[in-house]
Image (spheres, coloured by chain):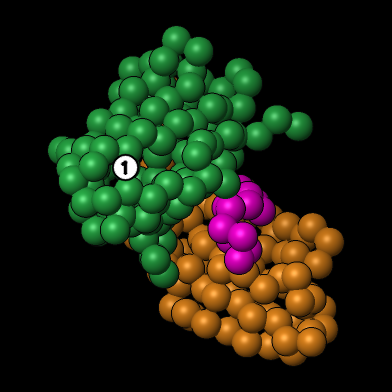
Amino acid sequence: AQKVTQAQTEISVVEKEDVTLDCVYETRDTTYYLFWYKQPPSGELVFLIRRNSFDEQNEISGRYSWNFQKSTSSFNFTITASQVVDSAVYFCALSELFTGANSKLTFGKGITLSVRP
Amino acid sequence: AAGVIQSPRHLIKEKRETATLKCYPIPRHDTVYWYQQGPGQDPQFLISFYEKMQSDKGSIPDRFSAQQFSDYHSELNMSSLELGDSALYFCASSHSGGEGEKLFFGSGTQLSVL
């Protein structure tokens, strides 16, 4: 069975601090996809990144960066110079792939990030 | 760009009533997923449809049913509502491409059962 573990439940930082959100996953699939979603207080789920299991290159997008380490089954997310608008719940998710068409997501429990001014 | 549209945004029902949630996927997306997120919980997969056929089923109660119509919109029908059905219900859509598609989520329908 697939599983996503986000051991941190709540993190509080002061604006401009860097913060890393951890994600560890379990799967028996050799091909899989990992995602991060942001859920601000307004409730919607905002897609941040998708990474496939064959691409271990780290990715940077503005203040966001992701570190994928297949050897430790981790896909960590770092926010540099955090801002108050980064306050949200962040979910890491893993997709099961079916032959052909669609995939469903298994989510972690989420990490509540609070950024104080 | 067009996003996934869910209606209504908020719904208040009483126990044992029925509710219908609607989802309009992004144009040209052929796959729809329904997720349920209880208070303080992670989203849980309920059911998915690909090309108007049910493609997978998760922890969806027998009291719930869903379908995808010819225009690809989907409806989640919930009967004999219970207090525990109070949750945020997300619809997501994707375009199948043989890869792990990006799921684009709607803003959700907040269902409150009193």
Q: Amino acid at mark 1?
A: Leu
Asked which quadrant contains residue A79, the reply is bottom right
Q: Main secondary structure of the magenta part?
A: strand
Q: Residue at x 47, y 26 (%)?
A: B31
Image x and y of residue A113, in percent = 61, 77
Chain represented in green:
B
Q: Is residue A47 magenta?
A: yes
State the residue position of label 1.
B46
Which chain does tag 1 point to?
A: B
- Residue A20 horizontal side relative to residue B36, left or right: right
Residue A13's place in the image compared with A2, above or below, is below
Query: Quick one: A99 or B111, which is closer to the camera?
Result: B111
Image x and y of residue B42, in percent = 41, 61
Q: Secondary structure at mark 1?
A: strand
In the rendered view of the protein, which quadrant contains the C terminus of chain B?
A: bottom left
Q: Which residues are magenta?
A: A38-52
Residue B31 in view in this figure: yes
